[in-house]
Amino acid sequence: MGDKSIIIPVLFFYICANYLHVLVAQDEPDCYFTDGFSVYVFNKLPPNSAPLKLHCASKDDDLGNHTLSTNQHFQWKFCENVVWSTLYFCHLWWDSMQKALETFNSLKREECDTGFCLWVAKTDGIYFTNGSITLSSLTKKFDWDISHAKNDIDVKEVLRGCIFDGMNVFIYSSGYEYITLDLLLYDLYTISNQSWWSD
């Protein structure tokens, strides 16, 4: 009789452990030779405020434009490339504020050593935590920048600092941090609402 009373709790524990493993595995990409990562961008801005708009991309993947209401999030999963040069960046807009930032960089992979990079937009800036799903260990990384007014873009100012890494041209300037030229041109076109490169 004593053996049967032990089997039921052990069997229950085994089933629960397998169920939790399946839940966690659903968030991890299937990577065979490199590490897998998941990146989340959360909107923790006040209710009834303007939505958070974002555009995220890497050299190889354009993740598109997204609009998040309060408490919504956008996420993506990827496998790091074998030469540790994976770089993802996002451009966030909220009301009259904006921020361009790296959301994952292989050269700074220790910042995301849990495999989960969580970025959180709040009223006073952009916060980061490494793997804490509860969002209780947030660290403020960036303040918001004031958005450029529509049709008031000084392209020379934006292109003032360029970095070439052998494959991409990256821009560094006020309001933009290491974003590719293609994404910058897309952002400038979207903000200015003019087809100035087809003239």
Image: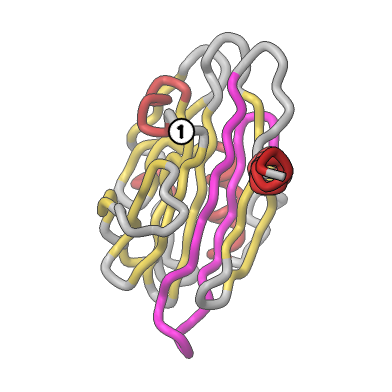
Residue 18 visible in the displayed image? no
Magenta residues span 35-61
Q: Is residue 140 left or right of residue 20?
A: left
Closest to the observer, 10 or 173: 10
Q: Quadrant of residue 39?
A: top right
Where is mark 1, residue-wise?
114
Identify which amino acid the numbered label 1 is placed on.
Thr
Query: With respect to residue 138, does 36 lie above or below?
Result: above
Q: Nearer the viewer, residue 29 or 169?
A: 29
What kind of element bears circle 1? loop
**Residue at x 40% of width, y 39% of height:** 159
> Along the horizontal axis of the image, is 190 left or right of 87?
right
Image coordinates of residue 77 in percent, x first then y, are 65, 39
Instruction: From the viewer's side, name the closer residue of 143 and 34.
Output: 34
- The number of numbered discs placed on residues in the rendered structure image is 1
Q: Report x, y in % for residue 91.
A: 49, 53
Magenta-colored stretch includes residue 48: yes
At a point 72% along the width and 50% down the height, the residue shown is 198
